[in-house]
Amino acid sequence: MIKLSSNENCYGCSPLAIEAIRKKYKDVHLYPELNPVALKEKLAEKYGVTSKNVIVGAGSVRIIDGLIQTFVGQGDEIITFEKSFVAYGQFAALHKHKCHFAPLKELRCAPENLLSFISKKTRLIFIANPNNPTGTIISHAELEKFLKKVSKKIIVVVDEAYAEYVNDPCYPHSFELQKKYPNLVILRSFSKIYGLAGLRIGYAILEEKLASQLTEGQIPFSLNYLSSVAAIAALEDEFFIARSANENAEQHDYLYQKLKKLGYNPIPSQANFIYLWFDKDSEKKKVYDLLFQNGIMICDMKIFGQEKALRITVGESSVNKKINVILNTFKFLLRK
């Protein structure tokens, strides 16, 4: 079974990360750093901040959970978008906080749609950029315009898990905006283009005071020893990141064009997946079942509460060609 349901990097991870793990695996009987200083310093160097501006956690979802636990009190509220990353709403519900879901605008997270939900109770706003599952982005100008209108008392979290795949020049320079808007928190991940999803490493860049408050609630030793080792090595391999991004752009265009030619409704994406929507849920199910029966597992968005939609991770060339052959060969069945 070829898995195209979780947006993993189909090219694996950096050979440097694998080699780093091989060199250190015999040390797993030792505890990791209480606070992963070496990784934080490496990330701080990369983004031109200090290590006091960096938070590292066991996946970005752990940091999302920490942000909610730390900054959202009883009676406070959270805002995000519908058809976006499910963790925001899930953790809000887990901690019994009200979460408002703003509608998308043509499957885009239009920031102006958030404004009507803001109140004195609003504490956190989550924006996935690129959005998961639609793969669409908001621009630098849109984000800056929104930040100007939002109270500095409200923390705006921009989740950029797929940022390294983006090739649109209007994508926000978030780290520049953060200098003007200290209430902006930027989330990034090693799970996507870095190919380290199984090691669970996420991080946030944020204002020092906010970082200090968030650190106080973190569980000691939350990042395992080999995760830190692999992440530091992965940051060194710029060639692997560039190759993954370039290959993804080429294969995304191929798969998008083939799906379009077959009469489907794919959404142009700035990530490593394509969102495919249907007029009827029955049509969607036929496509999902056909691919599954031929050894390809994609994501039925029904598990995230979204009917009539599929999400397909962009695979290697041979896999994407296989998808095209399957759908083209059996298109007469799919149209019945």
Image (cartoon, grey):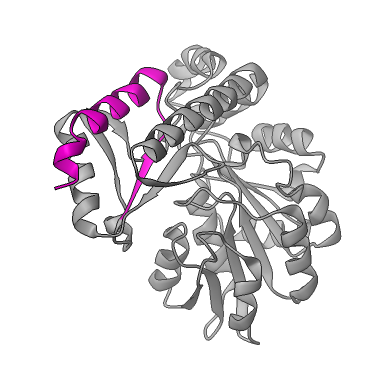
Residue at point 30%, 29% (across, down)? 323
Q: Nearer the viewer, residue 254 or 269?
A: 254
Magenta-span inclusion, residue 323: yes
Give the prevailing secondary structure in the magenta stretch: helix
Q: Residue furthest right?
A: 180
Q: Is residue 225 above or below residue 61?
A: above
Q: Percent from the top left, x then y, of residue 249?
A: 55, 29
Q: Which residues are magenta?
A: 309-336
Q: Is residue 101 above or below residue 128?
A: below
Q: Nearer the viewer, residue 261 or 326?
A: 261
Q: Quadrant of the N terminus?
A: top left
Q: Nearer the viewer, residue 87 or 103?
A: 103
Q: Is residue 246 above or below residue 145?
A: above
Q: Is residue 236 shown left or right of residue 310?
A: right
Residue at point 72%, 60% (across, down)? 143
Residue at point 77%, 75% (across, down)? 149
In this rendering, the count of numbered labels is 0
Residue at point 44%, 62% (across, down)? 83
Q: Percent from the top left, x then y, of residue 156?
A: 67, 65
Q: Is residue 267 shown left or right of residue 48?
A: left
| Residue 213, picture quadrant | bottom right
Q: Percent from the top left, x then y, of residue 245?
A: 58, 27
Q: Nearer the viewer, residue 205 or 5?
A: 5
Could one spot residue 219 in this view of the protein? no
Could one spot residue 220 in this view of the protein? yes
